[in-house]
Image (tube, helix red, strand yellow):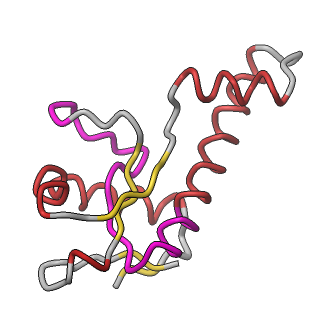
Amino acid sequence: MRVIKNFLHIDLSKVYAVIINDLVEDEEIDPDWPEFFICEDKENAEIIKNTLNAISFKDCSDLLLSEEPYLTTTEIKHLWVQLKAAQYTVHPVNYNLLNEHVHRVPMSLKSLKRLIPSIELV
């Protein structure tokens, strides 16, 4: 799994962003979860998105089960979606998207490296 660290000289038409859902521009940057980063291709972005969603679901599931141990997996999935707990999507990158969220990349890369230590920054 590879993420672009230095993206100043990349062709934006060939890269994809992984973005946390419900990202609001004027919100503070969350150091716990990556919010916006760029991948070399869609396949890589999808793999990382799926990995982050699985980590987020497990984290949310563990928390919910510690409070309400009787919950079923279906109920936990519903609550995970309803709570909007760190869920990710993949988007083609364009100049406006990059310009709007570029300030989130450094903290996101740190969070990503902490959650997925094997991630390669290129």
The correct choice, above or below, for 19 with respect to 6 in the image is above
User: For the point 45% across and 79% down, which residue is it?
Assistant: 2
User: For the point 66% across and 50% down, which residue is it?
Assistant: 54
* In this rendering, position of residue 59 left or right of residue 121: right
Which image quadrant: the C terminus?
A: bottom left
Residue 33 is a magenta residue: yes
64 or 85, nearer to the observer: 85
Q: Position of residue 104 (x, y in %)?
A: 22, 52
Residue 42 is a magenta residue: yes
**Residue 92 in which image quadrant:** bottom left
Q: Tell me where the magenta segment starts and ends, as one range.
A: 25-48
* In this rendering, position of residue 109 left or right of residue 48: left
Q: Position of residue 8 (x, y in %)?
A: 12, 79
Q: Position of residue 68 (x, y in %)?
A: 79, 14
* In this rendering, position of residue 114 left or right of residue 68: left
The correct choice, above or below, for 59 with respect to 5 in the image is above
User: For the point 45% across and 81% down, which residue is it?
Assistant: 120
12 or 59, nearer to the observer: 12
How many numbered callouts? 0
Q: Position of residue 103 (x, y in %)?
A: 15, 54
